[in-house]
């Protein structure tokens, strides 16, 4: 299975400006025929463009150097050189761009079509015609073009999804996502975890939203253990978390599983742990004793979390859960719009 590439480091360089030209036209009674050297063209910019059809940073693994076209040199008869073409680089929506040397965030591409210039092209040099004055009628010099900006930048992809599915490996997230959307995640009894986040679009009535299957976490994820640190950041931009817990897990109780995952979230980012969560007990079709469901509902209710028990295989409880999820998401979106309108 191809690994999800969510980080890359590339070198970008704007095109060099074209040199100004030294030239003289032949004209009677004009010293040396008069200066006629044109200016050089501007170098092209390197521009990142967010594209919803690009999903990973995989291409940057194979190509790391990007240079825009240089400007053409000026010519005689006051002809300016042609400006260099901008170099357009498509990146996924949700790409954060940093200066690799300082770590400073240069830009955050969160919308389709959003553009960011990461290396400006150099200015074209002026030709000798630009230096002519009443007292200096025949300048025999011109400016060289300026070099384009160059730097190493780091690209980091953070998924843009409305809802993030979190939980231990084998909590049933892949099966869950496959049932509520057209996404086709790889489903198996992985000994560790899915290797890449998968997005699915779900529709409940007239409301559609994006759900991300975040790879299963393990204890110690906030320290980079396993794949946790690689993907915890993908949860940061979601509005709502569905915390899936395998009710048939013999290695830990549902309460222990819940506390362990939330501890990892808080250690990674206190703000992340405060995101709204809905707790979902999975695999109830394989549950021999359902008496624990009342206990769990009471336990999570005291903590302020809604609790649902479902089976993605049989569909039991799924409609009720997704209706609640849709309503909760609408409430969160309305709160966000109110904040934006008041600011």
Image: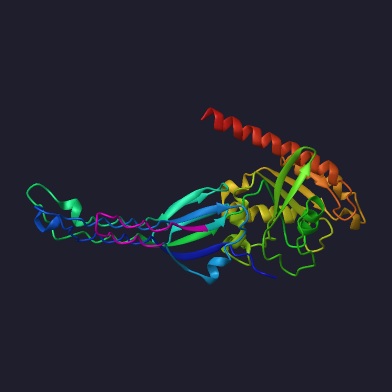
Q: Residue sitting at 48 percent across and 69 percent down?
A: 64
Which portion, as a residue range, is magenta?
A: 69-89
Q: Position of residue 139 (x, y in %)?
A: 13, 57
- Relative to 109, 45 lies left or right: left
- Relative to 148, 340 lies left or right: right
Image vertical order of residue 204 relative to residue 28, above or below: above
**Residue 74 is inside the magenta segment:** yes
Q: Position of residue 297 (x, y in %)?
A: 81, 43
Q: Which SS does the magenta portion mostly show?
A: loop
Q: Residue sitting at 73 percent across and 56 percent down?
A: 257
Q: Residue sitting at 46 percent across and 65 percent down?
A: 10
**Residue 163 is inside the magenta segment:** no
Q: Position of residue 62 (x, y in %)?
A: 54, 71
Q: Residue furthest left?
A: 135
Q: Kindly tell me whether residue 217 is visible in this rendering.
A: yes
Residue 321 sits in quarter: top right
Q: Residue furthest front?
A: 28
């Amino acid at each position: 299975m191809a690994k999800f590439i969510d980080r890359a480091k590339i070198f970008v360089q704007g095109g060099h400006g074209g040199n100004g030209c030294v030239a003289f036209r032949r004209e009677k009674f004009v010293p040396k025929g008069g200066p006629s050297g044109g200016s050089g063209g501007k170098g092209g910019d390197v521009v990142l463009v967010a594209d919803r059809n690009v999903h990973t940073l995989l291409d940057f693994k194979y190509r790391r150097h990007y240079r825009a076209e240089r400007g053409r040199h000026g010519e005689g008869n006051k002809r300016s050189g042609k400006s260099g073409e901008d170099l357009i680089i498509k990146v996924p929506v949700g790409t954060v761009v940093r200066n690799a040397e300082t770590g400073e965030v240069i830009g955050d591409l969160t919308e389709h079509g959003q553009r960011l210039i990461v290396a400006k092209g150099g200015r074209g040099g002026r030709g000798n015609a630009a230096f002519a004055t009443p007292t200096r009628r025949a300048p025999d010099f011109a400016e060289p073009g300026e070099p384009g900006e160059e730097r190493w930048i780091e690209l980091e992809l953070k998924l843009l999804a409305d809802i993030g599915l979190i939980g231990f490996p084998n909590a049933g997230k892949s099966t869950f996502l496959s049932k509520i959307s057209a996404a086709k995640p790889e489903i198996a009894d992985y000994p560790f975890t899915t290797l890449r986040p998968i997005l699915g679009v779900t529709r409940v009535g007239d409301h559609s939203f994006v759900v991300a299957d975040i790879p299963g976490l393990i204890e110690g994820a906030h320290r980079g253990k396993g794949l946790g640190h690689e993907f915890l950041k993908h949860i940061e931009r979601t509005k709502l978390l569905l915390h899936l817990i395998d009710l048939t897990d013999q290695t830990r109780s549902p309460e222990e599983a819940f506390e362990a995952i939330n501890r990892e979230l808080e250690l990674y980012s206190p703000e992340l742990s405060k995101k709204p969560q809905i707790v979902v007990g999975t695999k109830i079709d394989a549950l021999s004793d359902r008496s624990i469901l009342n206990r769990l509902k009471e336990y999570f209710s005291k903590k302020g979390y809604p609790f649902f028990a479902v089976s993605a295989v049989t569909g039991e409880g799924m409609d009720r859960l997704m209706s609640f999820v849709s309503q909760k998401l609408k409430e969160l979106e309305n709160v966000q719009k109110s904040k934006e309108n008041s600011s």
